[in-house]
Image: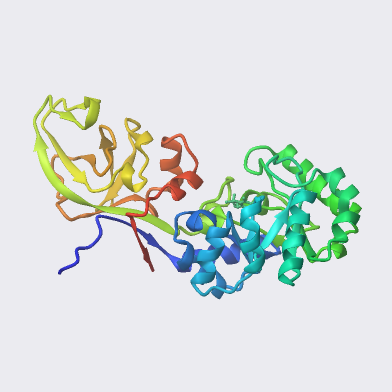
């Protein structure tokens, strides 16, 4: 049976990913935990993890044990760190696979300790401190108080301490407060020598702030080519381009309505192209009516009418030479993902992770 090319696909440039990773290493002055949660932000968990392993990152950061399992099953050996709190039924596999969790409570610590003792192993863990994210971790004073008790759990090897910035791309004074709070907490717990790894910064923290107590940084978005704060975009290279093809080109008459709900009606005979991508691929329906543009044959062209599940309609100039089969860039090197995310009233993180499985991932 012949196999047709994909309708919609993303091209992922792994050289750009490597470039961005080295930039993160350089600006942070730290070793890296490359964050690959949510299928490496939609870029493909296994493929991206393999590339990052070849770049010698210290850790891969994941959201859950299912992602860790997939990375191990792909043959990747790099240490894996779990970025959030865990619940009971996840813990045995975490210990058995030697995944590094971050600990938020004494209950969690004791549970991991008991499983490790039962399996006859010692589990490496990091302690999480909540300096203002409010999602997990010990409150700073609590941790200082409980360190002795934690240190007695000999099924655990405490190798790191971590916190997370809530507003590194929005609120400088609060971010500085979080950094100072983390530094202070590390000091109270015995200083930098007490922990092999100290880490706090996401992409915004790496690009916008200095942090002398840390020796590990956790870049996510920036390695995928997008800066969450102004001034650094030109230092990063585009990794993901979302593409599709023109499937139909026609001229429709004046007074002709376009797409669901008839939000666009032509005022004159209009050349239109139909493109084979929609919200079923993760192209956001919320850009409907916002004059979002696509890139065809070296020029921008506007979407008219609503984004449908599998197709969108583009307005073309009357003399357009665009034809069926032409490649269309929805975002990438020419139309930034950030531009589309803003038109969709969302953030690039959501745009990337929303690209659905039917979109083929092609690695360059
Ligand atoms: C997602 C995440 C990161 C990466 O954040 P970016 O803003 O994408 O760089 C870092 N640390 C933690 C704890 C996270 O959950």
Vertical side of 255 occupied by 234: above or below: below
Residue at 21% x, 26% y is 262
Measured as percent of width and height from the top left, residue 12 is found at 41, 62
**Which quadrant of the structure image shows residue 123?**
bottom right
The answer to which of 274 and 45 lies nearer the viewer is 45
Left or right: 348 with respect to 185?
A: left
Q: Quadrant of the C terminus?
A: bottom left
Q: Residue furthest front?
A: 118
Residue at 25% x, 25% y is 263
The answer to which of 284 and 144 lies nearer the viewer is 144
Measured as percent of width and height from the top left, residue 351 is found at 44, 45
Left or right: 251 with respect to 236?
A: left
**Which quadrant of the structure image shows residue 272?**
top left
Residue at 58% x, 74% y is 77
The answer to which of 177 and 135 lies nearer the viewer is 135
Q: Residue 198: in sight, yes or no? A: no
Measured as percent of width and height from the top left, residue 147 is found at 88, 54
């Amino acid at each position: 049976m012949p196999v047709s090319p994909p309708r919609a696909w993303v091209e992922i440039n792994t050289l750009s990913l490597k470039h961005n990773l080295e930039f993160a290493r350089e600006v942070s002055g730290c070793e890296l935990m490359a964050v690959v949660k949510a299928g490496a932000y939609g870029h493909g968990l296994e493929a991206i993890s393999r590339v990052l392993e070849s770049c010698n990152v210290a850790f891969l950061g994941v959201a859950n044990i299912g992602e860790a399992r997939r990375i191990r099953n792909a043959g990747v050996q790099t240490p894996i760190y779990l970025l959030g709190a865990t619940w009971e039924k996840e813990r045995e596999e975490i210990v058995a696979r030697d995944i590094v969790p971050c600990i938020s409570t004494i209950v969690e610590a004791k549970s991991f300790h008991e499983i490790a003792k039962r399996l006859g192993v010692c589990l490496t863990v990091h302690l999480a401190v909540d300096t203002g994210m409010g999602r997990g971790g010990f409150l700073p004073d609590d941790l200082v108080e409980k360190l002795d008790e934690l240190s007695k759990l000999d099924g655990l090897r405490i190798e790191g301490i971590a916190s997370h910035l809530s507003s590194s791309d929005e609120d400088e004074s609060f971010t500085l407060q979080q950094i100072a709070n983390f530094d202070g907490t590390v000091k109270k717990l015995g200083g930098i020598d007490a922990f092999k790894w100290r880490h706090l910064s996401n992409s915004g923290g790496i690009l916008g702030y200095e942090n002398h107590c840390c020796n590990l940084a956790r870049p996510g978005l920036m390695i995928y080519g997008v800066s969450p704060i102004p001034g650094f975009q030109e230092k990063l290279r585009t990794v993901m381009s979302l593409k599709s093809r023109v499937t139909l080109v026609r001229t429709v008459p004046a007074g002709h309505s376009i797409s669901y709900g008839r939000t666009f009606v032509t005022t004159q005979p209009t050349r239109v192209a139909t493109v084979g991508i929609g919200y079923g691929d993760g192209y956001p329906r919320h850009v409907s009516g916002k004059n979002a543009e696509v890139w065809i044959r070296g020029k921008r062209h506007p979407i008219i009418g609503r984004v449908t599940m599998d197709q969108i309609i583009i307005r073309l100039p009357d003399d357009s030479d665009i034809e069926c089969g032409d490649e269309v860039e929805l975002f990438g090197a020419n139309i930034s993902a950030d531009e589309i995310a803003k038109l969709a009233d969302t953030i690039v993180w959501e745009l990337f992770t929303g690209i659905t499985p039917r979109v083929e991932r092609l690695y360059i």
